[in-house]
Amino acid sequence: MSTQLDRRRQLMDSALEEFATNGYYATKIASIVERTGVAQGTFYWHFKSKKEIALAILAEGEQALLNVIESGYRKEVGTVTEMLDSSQSLMTHLFTFAKENRDLMKLLFLTGQNAEDEILDLIQKINQDLEDAFNRNIHRATDLGMLEKRDSKDLRGTMLTNLVKGMIQRWLFNQNENQDSISSLNPEDIAKEVVYFEFYGLLGASQD
């Protein structure tokens, strides 16, 4: 049983590398099995199609991403400093996850965009679930009195989600041949700047 599970894992890892490198449509099952070092029949033992393995990869990645965000769920009231530290810890974990799962991020944000409708629907769902997860954290912090009550709580979640997604794409994938000051940053540096912008915006000064 463990051997079959290991083989399934190997196929998914190989497929993710192919999807990230070549894009969904350009990836062939033959290239997946070649990268894995198995017979084509082994692929069909575990997955019915290329679409099925892509959906499995994305579903697994979605859960991992949500687990990272949910780990930062605010459970009790705290000071502004504690809230900043908590948010920075959450963002550090999120950007570390993104860096360690670069191929997943590339499939989710870039190379999966030319896929079949069912895959595009799942990618859209993942993006919405990420936004909902951030919104839950914002709502909880508001309920605890740590954030100002506004009618635009969900809008803040949308803005934060797009800020994080944009930074991941810029940080990991939009690298120039010349030294890029953003791409050279580590997850802690990115997290610190995102959280500072999240709380204080363009003024760059804390609120009294």
Image (cartoon, rainbow, N blue to C red):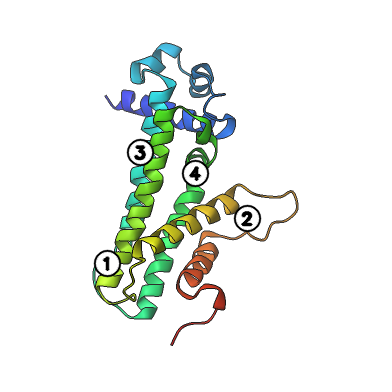
Mark-to-mark CA distance, 1 and 4: 27 Å
Q: Which residue is mark 1?
A: 140
Q: Earlier in the sequence, mark 3 or mark 4?
A: 3
Q: Which amino acid, mark 4?
A: Met
Q: Nearer the viewer, residue 101 or 203?
A: 203
| Mark 3 vs 4: CB contact within 8 A | no
Whether residue 10 appears in this view of the structure is no
Amino acid bearing label 2: Ser
Q: Which mark is residue 43?
A: none
Residue 74 coordinates in the image, percent (x, y): 28, 67
Q: Which mark is residue 105?
A: 4
Please give the residue where the numbered disc 3 appears in the rendered image. 60
First-in-chain label (1 vs 4): 4
Q: In this picture, is 190 found above or below 78?
A: above
Label 2, label 4: how far apart the Cα atoms are: 15 Å
Q: Residue tagged by mark 2?
A: 183
Asked if residue 169 lies left or right of residue 129, the reply is: right
